[in-house]
Amino acid sequence: MADEIWTVKKILDWTVGYLDRRGDERPRLSAEWLLSAATGLSRVEIYINFDKPLMPDELALMREGVRRRAAGEPLQYVTGEMPFRHIVLKCEPGVLIPRPETEVLVDAVLEGLEGRELPRVLDLCTGTGCIALSVATEHPETVVIATDISPKACALAERNSRALGCEGWVDVLECDLAEGVVPAFEGTFDVLVSNPPYIPTAVLAEQVPSEVRDFEPALALDGGADGLDIFRRILELAPRMLKPGGLLACELFEEALDAAADLVHAEGRWEGIEVREDLTNRPRIIIARLEG
């Protein structure tokens, strides 16, 4: 490959064919992403620069990206970024890749902030910081405390925060839910939001695509036998962290939402309990307000 002159069109066509033969479900999309990451061209610019030759360093980047993608590695890890709502986040192996369905969770948070002055949000299991940083950029007067048990996730969320200029609004803490959150924060939040590990263990082992199971961290995926292990801990913690009338919003496994709603009802201290669908019309998030 390196001894030939490779134009944008030639490398695009070759990559599409190669990835298709390797079983990529969307080879053209993968090829466009990889080429964009290697050359700095947008996906639109790729198609108006077909005759542009790739420089040696661009070709080397493309070659490595194709190798990783052909081995099944997620595109977001290979290219190092992922668009989410109105921002673009850095992504890296060891940290969960943001999903489009999580965008509806941000909508629920923003609704919960309506009419509140200088609101505060607690984001548990923040990962890349996609929720915390979306809230901070779309509702700038909000202060967000973002936590994760993973040092790698916290470091990445901090880098994303700096890249987006959110350091004054988003504070990232490494925190294990088993140890609780800093006591000084108790009773100070208007919204507690989380996209916790929620895939049932058996589903993760038997049904989840290998691209997810083999490359993304099990720590951010495995929710225990019924997918609700971490949610139970969040539900125990939430009343201590929220102000009266504060909102709890969590993303969960689609087949676990009814059971999650039953758990919330059984607590006897929540109202306005609601299950909402994601962009594919599947049950995805649960919201509830702490009694005032």
Image (cartoon, rainbow, N blue to C red):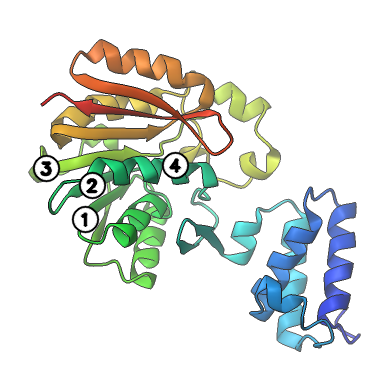
Closer to us: mark 3 or mark 1? 1
Question: In the image, what residue type sits under mark 2?
Answer: Val
The amino acid beneath tag 3 is Thr
Instruction: Please give left or right for residue 61 compared with residue 52 in the image.
Output: left
Q: Which mark is residue 142?
A: 1
User: Mark 4 or 3 closer to N-term?
Assistant: 4
Which is nearer the N-term, disc 4 or disc 2?
A: 4
Compared to residue 223, the image places residue 28 above or below, namely below
The residue beneath circle 4 is 104
User: What amino acid is at disc 4?
Assistant: Val
**Which is more N-terminal, label 2 or label 1?**
2
Residue 169 at x, y percent in the picture:
23, 62
Disc 1 to disc 2: CB gap under 8 Å: yes
Q: For the residue labelled by badge 4, is the local secondary structure a helix, a strand or a loop?
A: helix
Q: What residue appears at the point 69 percent right and 37 percent down from the top-left corner?
A: 209
Q: What secondary structure is marked by label 3? A: loop
Which residue is painted at 65% across and 53% down in the image?
A: 74
Mark 3 surroundings within 10 Å by alpha-carbon count, few (fewer than 14), some (14 through 19), many (20 or more): some
Q: Look at mark 3 in the image and give the residue it sits on.
A: 188
Report which residue position mark 2 lands on.
121
Using the numbered discs, state the Cα–Cα distance from disc 4 to disc 2 in whole angstroms: 16 Å
Q: Whole-Å distance between the Cαs marked 2 and 3?
A: 9 Å
Give the distance between the C-alpha atoms of the residues marked 1 and 4, in whole angstroms. Answer: 18 Å
Between 3 and 290, the one lying in front of the other is 290
Q: Is residue 249 above or below residue 265?
A: below
